[in-house]
Image (cartoon, rainbow, N blue to C red):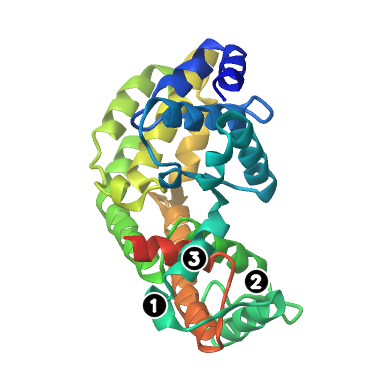
Amino acid sequence: MQEEFRTAYKQLNTAQKEAVDIIDGPVLVVAGPGTGKTQLLSLRVANILQKTDTDPGSILCLTFTNFAATNMRERLANLVGPSAQNVMVRTFHSFAAEIMNLYPDYFWNGARLQIAPDAVQLEIIQEILESLPLHNPLAVKFAGTYTAISDVQQALKLAKEAGLTPEKLQAMLEVNIAYLDLIEPQLSELLSPALSLKRLPDLQMAVEALPDQPIDETITPLTSLSTVLKESLAAAVAVDQVTGKTTQSGKWKRRWLQRVNGQYSMLDERKRNAWWQALAEVYGSYRDHLHGQGYYDYSDMIVEVVSQLE
């Protein structure tokens, strides 16, 4: 299969060849749809197999769709030959399902749960929302219907696919709220004067000097609130310095601070965190109800496998 590899390799541009040639360590390739990412990844696998004694069964390729996984298997077969069959090419969910099937004792004490139908998931969420106190932000109704149902479903999916259990989500939110308590007085003082183009560099330096939340590594792939705060201001200032206006910095200021009774506060950010705290409680109840009825949902496969691997 050397000839197939050489032919495909010659068709790569310089940056693509660089990615294929790196055998050890992580490589990040940022490219749009249809730019050859699948081919590049296939060639990198083939290159690793050609230049090292790596067993094909020790290589795992993960992708988002069944179509992409099938495409990659076919390309690897053309580049590598029969041994490509031993390279594990899966979608994230199918790989998680395979882990659960191979090691059932690590999941729900060996209980064989089933994927919950959409109707069951919706029914459980509805029951949980009905049990919430009226002041809960997720208990809001309009015309007899809970308006937050679709938001709750989406938030549960996002939390699980980020690898967050209810406990991890709650712990992260507690860290966020403590951080808001810490920086709110300082940020309010910094942003009380009107914005001006001349002040932006000093403002950026002052915000950069605010305390960090040293949690980025523990919550990856999420980003800490302090990192979002500082990086979003840096991006806004960079645009404003080009345009000669404070439009983006003004949007940034309004996103983080709101005037309440004549005083600036991080009201909207506190509301966001309060909403997610309510969601974390619903998440715990939802998972308990689901498992208690012998089910798990599609996104459970990701969070359960991540938790057990950790």
- Mark on residue 275? 3
Q: Is residue 242 left or right of residue 144?
A: left
Q: Is residue 40 left or right of residue 217?
A: right
Dot 1: what SS? helix
Q: Give the mark, 2 or 1, whose residue is nearer the N terminus.
A: 1
Q: Looking at the image, is 214 positioned above or below residue 27?
A: below
Return the residue nearer the eye: 194 or 203: 203
Dot 2: what SS? helix
Tell me the quarter of the picture where residue 2 sits: top right
Q: Give the mark, 3 or 1, whose residue is nearer the N terminus.
A: 1
- Mark on residue 105? 1
> What residue type is disc 2 on?
Ile
Q: Is residue 108 left or right of residue 174?
A: right
Dot 3: what SS? helix
- Residue lying at 43% horizontally and 63% vertically, measured from the top left: 305
- Foreground tag (2 vs 1): 1
- Foreground tag (3 vs 1): 1
Give residue 87's position: percent from left, percent from top: 50, 44
Q: Is any atom of residue 194 visible in this view?
A: no
> What residue type is disc 1 on?
Asp
User: Which residue does the numbered mark 2 point to in the structure image?
Assistant: 149
- Residue lying at 56% horizontally and 88% vertically, measured from the top left: 293
- Residue lying at 48% horizontally and 36% vertically, measured from the top left: 252
Mark 2 Cα within 10 Å, few/some/many (few <14, many 20+)? some
Q: Give the mark, 2 or 3, whose residue is nearer the N terminus.
A: 2
Q: Looking at the image, is 253 positioned above or below residue 100?
A: above
Q: Looking at the image, is 209 positioned above or below residue 184?
A: above
Give residue 249's position: percent from left, percent from top: 47, 30
- Check the picture and name the quadrant holding the C terminus: bottom left
Query: Are dots 2 and 1 in contact, CB under 8 Å?
Result: no
